[in-house]
């Protein structure tokens, strides 16, 4: 079974250590996590973001950086 885009409510509870949404929101804010609150007042966290924050995500591709040194006159 493939994991969804967002953490499941049980995963948010495991992550934060709290079952109540208000306490989960408080924990996420205190730790500086990015999240949204859905219509049911539950915090939702993107799975890839959580993996990145926990240090177990796939490293991001390096962005292209121009080599300005090669443009200098010789």
Image (cartoon, rainbow, N blue to C red):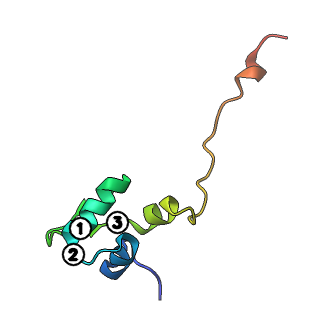
- State how far apart marks 1 and 2 are (Cα): 6 Å
Q: Residues within 10 Å of mark 2 (few under 14, many from 20)?
A: few
Residue drawn at point x = 29 percent, y = 67 percent:
44
Q: In this orientation, does residue 31 appear? A: yes
> Residue 57: image x %, image y %?
56, 64
Question: Cβ–Cβ below 8 Å for labels 3 and 1?
Answer: no
Mark 3 vs mark 2: give the one in front. Answer: 2
Residue drawn at point x = 42 percent, y = 69 percent:
47
Q: Which residue has dot 2 on it? A: 20
Q: Nearer the viewer, residue 9 or 46?
A: 9
**Residue at the extreme right:** 74
With 73 as the anchor, is 54 left or right in this view? left
> Residue 27: image x %, image y %?
31, 62
Q: Nearer the viewer, residue 69 or 28?
A: 28
Q: Is residue 34 above or below residue 2?
A: above
> Which of the numbered marks, if any, corresponds to residue 45?
3
What SS does tag 3 mark?
loop
Q: Nearer the viewer, residue 23 or 59?
A: 23
> Residue 33: image x %, image y %?
37, 56
What SS does tag 1 mark?
helix
Q: Residues within 10 Å of mark 1 (few under 14, many from 20)?
A: some
Q: Earlier in the sequence, mark 3 or mark 1?
A: 1
Q: Which residue has dot 1 on it? A: 23
With 7 as the anchor, is 53 left or right in this view? right
> Which of the numbered marks, if any, corresponds to residue 74?
none
Mark 3 vs mark 1: give the one in front. Answer: 1
Question: Cβ–Cβ below 8 Å for labels 1 and 2?
Answer: yes
Q: In this orientation, does residue 33 appear? A: no
- For the image, the number of numbered tags is 3
Residue drawn at point x = 63 percent, y = 46 percent:
62
**Residue at the extreme bottom:** 1
- State how far apart marks 3 and 1 are (Cα): 15 Å
């Amino acid at each position: 079974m493939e994991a969804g885009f967002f953490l499941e409510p049980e995963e948010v509870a495991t992550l934060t250590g709290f079952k109540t949404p208000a306490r989960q929101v408080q924990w996420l804010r205190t730790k500086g996590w990015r999240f949204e609150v859905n219509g049911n007042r539950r915090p939702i966290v993107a799975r890839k973001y959580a993996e990145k924050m926990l240090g177990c995500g796939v490293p991001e591709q390096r962005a292209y950086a121009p080599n300005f040194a090669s443009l200098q006159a010789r």
